[in-house]
Image: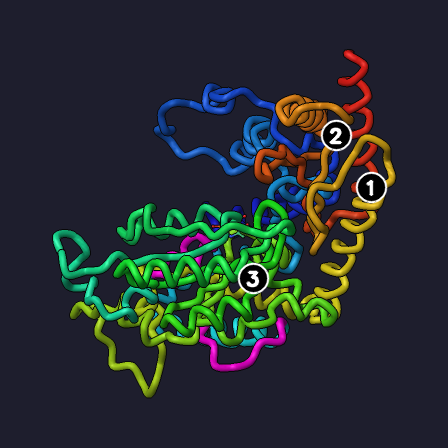
Amino acid sequence: LSPDEFRAAAHSAVDWIADYLEHSERYPVRSAVAPGAIRAQLPASPPQQGEPLAAMLHDVEHTLLPGITHWNHPAFFAYFANSASYPGILGELLTAGLNANGMLWITSPAVTELEAVTLDWLRQLMALGDGWFGQITDTASMSTFYALAAARERAGFDVRTKGMAARPELPRLRVYCSEHAHSSIDKAVIALGLGLENLVKIPADDQFRMRAALLEDAIAADVAAGYHPLAVVPCVGTTSTTSIDPVTVVVRIARRYGCWVHVDAAYGGVAAIVPELQYILDGVDAADSFVVNPHKWLFTPMDCSVLYTRDAAALKRAFALLPEYLVTQTQGDAVNLMDYGIQLGRRFRALKLWMVLRAFGQDGLAERIRFHCELAREFAGMVHFEGGWELTAPVTLSLVCFRLAPSGATEQQLATLNAAIMERVNARGHVYLSHTKLGDRYTLRLAIGNIRTDRQHVELAWRELREAAAAITQGE
Ligand code: PLP
């Protein structure tokens, strides 16, 4: 491929992306293909001779696109959104073009230093105090794993050298989170060898927030039993309902027992960019670490999660290693980001986030996040005032939990009914939503967070839901 051919192909790819984003509503939000359908259309063996880029772009459009679920679609309301804004996409493009690897400071000083500056900007935007060390990871799951690894290191059992197996002197290391915590906490506990039976799920109150008094009881009982309380993981914006755990109280309790506090603000944290929503991060400044995902609700393309910690030294003790082939004559106090996690190679992810923060500014970001919360309240209002429907959780940020709940139906019947409504709506392809369970209550979730979502898309979702409900209840 010559530079000129690349230039031409890249221009047409950018044109294609611009058209795609402008008209993503042409496509069904959720892919409708059957398992294996995409694979069946693809050659099983690689080509012997090189192929022209035009052929690949053609296949992207005609073969792969039907197998894409369009997270950039303005009526994508499932899970939590991640939508790619134009500046974020440009950042990704430049990252690929530069192909810098920031494994060490010297292997691209700008990668390390822009990451530090960008994450400090993000911290300021969320109105947190200084003294946090930030690094970008791929996902909140990885960020939480790192945080708990740092907690384990700081606890002083020298797991790094001795491991955890066959050590009778090692107490059970306990981690606490609410029953509504994300499964990434469970995964981190598994991966760190702590054992799932040592992850204590604290019951939540009727608004799905961790009950701090029960946390204290659980820790005290564990201490009495000779266990070691290692870490508490409160959540700001739980996955099922976006409830907010009482971080300030949790930190106070955790401090009494020497626990590390890691706050999972993967989805909700960025809402603190909106001045009147800053309170959601109350207490976080006193925690040891927290995670927030710009790739969820900050219009930054996948993937970009940020782990902040106040005890970077513990994180470094957990992971730093220096084989001879990585020794550099680094100047001054240059940070080598490889020391703070498992990965050595490091993509230039900060670039896209930096471009997003610059392109929108605090006001632009706050305006969009605020608008999403407003749309969620409007949708909740429609549900609330429609006979037969009910809200199943408070609307804290931009997620609405709701369901059709005709009187007299059992939980099992409501689950079947609402699952059928959701499937009918999703199969039509105009909007896409997902579900959860709150206790035994099957619940639909409408999560607003896509940069292209407007009022008309939320209204469309409501129309589709009511039509689906009517068709199903009338036995169509
Ligand atoms: N924490 C919370 C509260 C989440 O909602 C999610 C995902 O939705 C995660 C963590 C995991 O995020 P990731 O996909 O970045 O690992």
Q: Does residue 130 belong to the magenta stretch?
A: yes
Between the C-alphas of marks 1 and 2, the distance is 12 Å
Element under label 2?
A: loop
Mark 3 near mark 2, Cβ–Cβ under 8 Å? no
Residue 280: where, in percent of width, then height?
A: 64, 66
Say if residue 83 shows up in the picture. no
Nearest to viewer (mark 3 / mark 1): 1
Q: Quarter-wise, where is residue 79 in the image? A: top right
Q: Residue 352 carries which label?
A: 3
* Residues packed near mark 2 inside 10 Å, few (<14), some (14 to 19) or many (20 plus): some
Find the magenta span and give its range: 126-148
Say if residue 239 shows up in the picture. yes
**Up/down of 283 relative to 356, above or below:** below
Element under label 3?
A: helix
Viewer-side residue, 441 vs 436: 441
Nearest to viewer (mark 3 / mark 2): 2
Label 1 vs 2, first from the N-terminus: 1
- The structure residue drawn at horizontal position 15% and vertical position 61%, both measured from the top left corner, is 169
Which amino acid, mark 3?
Lys
Task: Indicate left or right for 105 with 267 as reference.
Answer: left
* Mark 1, residue position: 384
Task: Work out which quarter of the rendered image holds the C terminus and state it.
Answer: top right
Q: Which mark is residue 405?
A: 2
Q: Does residue 446 belong to the magenta stretch?
A: no
Element under label 1?
A: helix
